[in-house]
Image: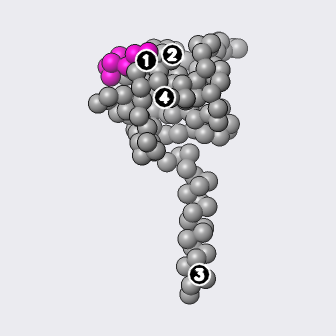
Amino acid sequence: MKKAAVAVIIFLAIMLMQNRSSLPVQVCFGDSCFSVETASTQEERSKGLMFRENLADESGMLFLFEEEGYHPFWMKNTLIPLDIIWLDKDKKAVFLKEGAQPCKEDPCLSIDPGIKAMYVLEIGSGAAAKAGIKIGDKAVFNPQD
């Protein structure tokens, strides 16, 4: 019986570790919070919010990178306009692209802030202004912080 219980616990721990990127996270700027999916693998980051026909208010996707660097984004196969916020290693907003439009040409042009970031947050177009987010604002991630 003990071996079976240990096996179940190990199995669940492995499943949680493998699926940690899909666990919802809350990203807050002051009193404005977004419940977001996370993208931490190259495959998840490449897919991002592609092919989504809508995005609920106060939701989005948080892209997690292993290290701070230059992370240009594009709107290929993205069907909805987005606000995109680049955050440095201290979770401070270093660049904001409001109202990024779906790509209608091939090749798609990248949005390249030319500033190092470790996280990138995509939320619905207009959500950044509604929340009053601006360059220099610091984000808090929950439950991770």
Q: Which residue is mark 1?
A: 136
In the image, is residue 55 above or below residue 19? above
Q: Which mark is residue 4?
A: 3
Q: CA distance from mark 2 to mark 4?
A: 12 Å
Q: Report the span colored magenta.
A: 129-136
Nearer to us: label 3 or label 2: 2
Q: CA distance from mark 1 to mark 4?
A: 9 Å
The picture places residue 16, in percent across and down from the top left corner, at 55, 57
| SS at mark 3 in the image | helix
Q: Quadrant of residue 7?
A: bottom right
Q: Amino acid at mark 1?
A: Gly
Q: Nearer the viewer, mark 1 or mark 3?
A: 1
Residue 97 within the segment the image draws in magenta: no
Which one is earlier in the sequence, the residue at label 1 or at label 4?
A: 4
Residue neighbourhood size for the residue with mark 3, other residues' Cα within 10 Å, grouped as few (<14), some (14–19), many (≥20):
few
Q: Which kind of residue does numbered mark 3 sit on?
A: Ala
Q: Which residue bears the numbered disc 2?
A: 95
What type is the residue that disc 4 sits on?
Lys
Residue furthest right in the image: 107
Q: CA distance from mark 3 to mark 2?
A: 50 Å
Q: Secondary structure at mark 1?
A: loop
- The residue located at (48%, 15%) in the rendering is 96
Taking the spot 57% from the left edge, 63% from the top edge, the residue there is 13
Specify the amino acid type for callout 2: Phe
Any magenta on residue 135? yes
Prevalent SS, magenta region? loop
Circle nearer the viewer, 2 or 1:
1
